[in-house]
Image: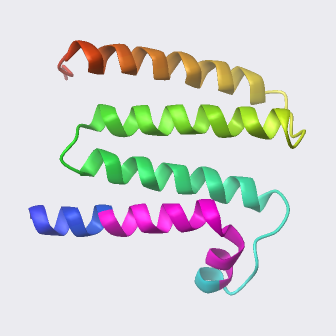
Amino acid sequence: MKRALTFAAVGEASTGLALLIVPGLVGRLLLGEELTGIAIPVARVAGISLIALAVACWPGTPRAGMMTYSAAVTLYLAYLGLADGLTGILLWPAVVLHAILTALLTVGITRGEEIKT
């Protein structure tokens, strides 16, 4: 089972990285159509999600995967708002929420707290 999980993590991380770097190519190869317009940032957020999933499935913890996602999506959404001028009504509240979640998850990881279910 460990080999299957490692294989899946590597595959998802690779796909996520490809979505971050060349989302149009991934769209063309997977769906037969070039991704354009607003599909590009959406594909990149999906790429961030896949990378975070891979981190959660690797020998780390689910919290590390969630922290990876939250930190990366905070930075990417802030970049979209500042550099690309994409500013929907929920963009900045989402950036603030993810920044807070990143801080809380980071504190939990640095303290070595266990997740209680």
Quadrant of res 113:
top left
Is 73 placed left or right of 116 in the picture?
right
Where are the magenta residues, as a range?
Answer: 10-28
Q: Residue at x 33, y 48 (%)?
A: 55
Could you tell me residue 5's position as x and y percent?
20, 62
Could you tell me residue 18's position as x and y percent?
55, 68
The vertical placement of 41 against 78, above or below, is below
Q: Residue at x 61, y 31 (%)?
A: 74
Classify the position of the C terminus by image quarter. Answer: top left
The vertical placement of 14 against 72, above or below, is below
Is 78 placed left or right of 112 in the picture?
right
Q: Residue at x 85, y 39 (%)?
A: 83
- Secondary structure mostly seen in magenta is helix
Is 85 placed left or right of 10 in the picture?
right
| Residue 17 drawn in magenta | yes
Quadrant of res 105:
top left
The vertical placement of 105 against 80, above or below, is above
- In the picture as drawn, the residue positioned furthest to the right comes out as 85
Q: Residue at x 81, y 56 (%)?
A: 38
Quadrant of res 84:
top right
Could you tell me residue 109's position as x and y percent?
28, 21
The vertical placement of 110 against 85, above or below, is above
Could you tell me residue 48's position as x and y percent?
53, 50
